[in-house]
Image (cartoon, rainbow, N blue to C red):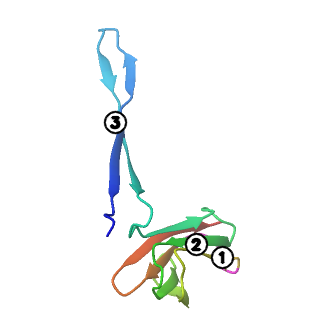
Amino acid sequence: MMKRLHFFCLLTVLTLGAIRSSGTAALAQPVTERVTTAVRGSDEKSMLVYPNPSTGIVHVAINGFEGRRLELQILNVIGSVIYRENLSELNDRYTKTLDLTKFAGGLYYIKIASDNTSEMRKLVIR
């Protein structure tokens, strides 16, 4: 059986401020970004919502949930479910297009859930 490898990189970028007249450099706050790269065939699960912000037509790309049943939910800012759909027979890379033009502009959450995991992303509709 092939080992599945995951490479995690934590990139930290520090910027130097202007050199003060005393000759010392001031450090700005660090900017930290986590980059995850997985070898093909791994169990990496992810959800991407785009475009964000959106005018109402939204694409939800779901990876790593092959063969599982998922529930897709859209929640308003107070957590009430305003849309629900069950997804089945997913392939490794599945994309669902949603027409949310009937919803008022504002902040929403898109959630997918299976038996043992869930993912949630923020969505802004203009």
Nearer to us: label 2 or label 3: 2
The residue that appears at 39% across and 78% down in the rendered structure is 118
**Secondary-structure class at tag 3:** loop
Q: Are marks 2 and 1 in contact (CB under 8 Å)?
A: yes
Q: Are marks 2 and 3 in contact (CB under 8 Å)?
A: no
**What's the amino acid at mark 2?**
Val
Residue 100 shown left or right of residue 110 in the figure: right
Q: Which mark is residue 97?
A: 1
- Quadrant location of the N terminus? bottom left
Residue 53 in which image quadrant = bottom right
Task: Give the distance between the C-alpha atoms of the residues marked 1 and 3, in whole angstroms.
Answer: 39 Å
Q: Quadrant of the C terminus?
A: bottom right
Residue 109 or 37: which is nearer the viewer?
37
Marks 2 and 3, the one that precedes in the sequence: 3
Verify whether residue 119 appears in magenta.
no
Q: What residue is at 54 percent from the left and 82 percent from the top? A: 90
**Residue 23 vs residue 32, the one in the foreground:** 32
Q: Amino acid at mark 1?
A: Thr
Q: Residue at x 68, y 72 (%)?
A: 56
Where disc 2 sits, the SS reads strand
Local SS, label 1: strand
Q: Nearer the viewer, residue 89 or 80?
A: 89
The residue segment tinted magenta is 102-108
Which residue was labeled with disc 3?
A: 29
Earlier-in-chain disc, 2 versus 1? 2
